[in-house]
Amino acid sequence: MVEISRPIYKDNHISILQAEKSAVPGMYEIKPLLHKESTIELSDTELALFIYMQRQLRLGLKTLFNVELCGLYVEEHPDRQVTSYTIPFHIDKLTEQFSTDVYQPHIADYLKSYTLSSSCHQIETFNAGMKEMLDPPSVRKDIKSILARGLVRSTETALPKSKEIEKVPKIE
C-alpha cells in the first residue's frame, strides 16, 4: 500500500503531499502548517511560497512526466485549512471519456476514474520524482531567498483602509 499521506516536501511554513482523497498520480496539495482557512490569512511570505511551490510542481509534472494539462485550484472552506491543489490531467486517461476542449464540467468524474489499487505504483513514481524535483540546491536557495525577504505583512495592513470600499453597493 502506498503511503500517500507522507509529505514530499515540508518546511516550517508549508507541506506538500499527494492529495489525500485522490488516486490521481501527481495530484498534490499544498497546505500551510498553521491552520489558516483563507489566503487572506496567509502572510505574504506564505503566499509567495504557495505560488512558488505551485510553479515547481507544475514544472516537475511537465518536465518529468510530460503532463501537458494541469488545473491549479485553491479551496477555502470555513473550519478547514486553505489548500492549493495541483491536478494533472493525464491526456490519455482524460480522452478515454472526455474532450480536452470541455473537460472542466467532468473534473469530478475524471478524479473518480482513478483507483488507488490501479495507480499505487504510479503515485510512488510521481512522489519520488517530485521529491527530487523539490530538493535541489537551486530550489532551497529560492526558498531561502523568499523567506529572507521577510514579506510578513499582516492582513490588517494588506487590506485597503479606504472609505471608497464602504460606498460600493451591496450585490443582491
Image (cartoon, rainbow, N blue to C red):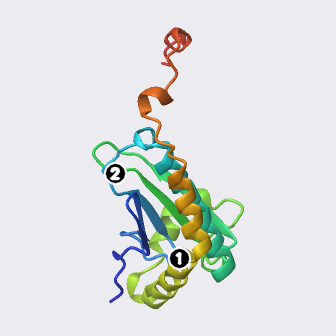
Q: Residues within 10 Å of mark 1 (few under 14, many from 20)?
A: few
Q: Mark 1 or 2, which is nearer the eye?
A: 1
Taking 159 as reference, is 55 above or below it?
A: below
Cα–Cα span, label 1 and label 2: 25 Å
Instruction: Please state which amino acid type lies under the numbered disc 2.
Output: Gln
Instruction: Please state which amino acid type lies under the numbered disc 1.
Output: Asp
Q: Spot the residue most to the left.
A: 79
Instruction: Give me the residue at 57% from left, 57% from top.
Output: 145
Q: Spot the residue most to the front.
A: 148
Q: Residues within 10 Å of mark 2 (few under 14, many from 20)?
A: some
Residue 67: x and y in percent read: 66, 75
Taking 169 as reference, is 64 above or below it?
A: below
SS of the residue under disc 1? loop
Q: Earlier in the sequence, mark 1 or mark 2?
A: 2
Instruction: Give me the residue at 49% from left, 67% from top.
Output: 109
Residue 2: x and y in percent read: 36, 86
Instruction: Give me the residue at 60% from left, 57% from top.
Output: 104
Residue holding disc 1: 135
Is 20 or 105 nearer to us in this picture? 20
From where the camera sits, is residue 105 visible?
A: no
Is 11 or 62 nearer to us in this picture? 11
CB within 8 Å, label 1 to label 2: no
- Displayed quadrant of residue 164: top right
Taking 68 as reference, is 142 above or below it?
A: above
Residue holding disc 2: 81
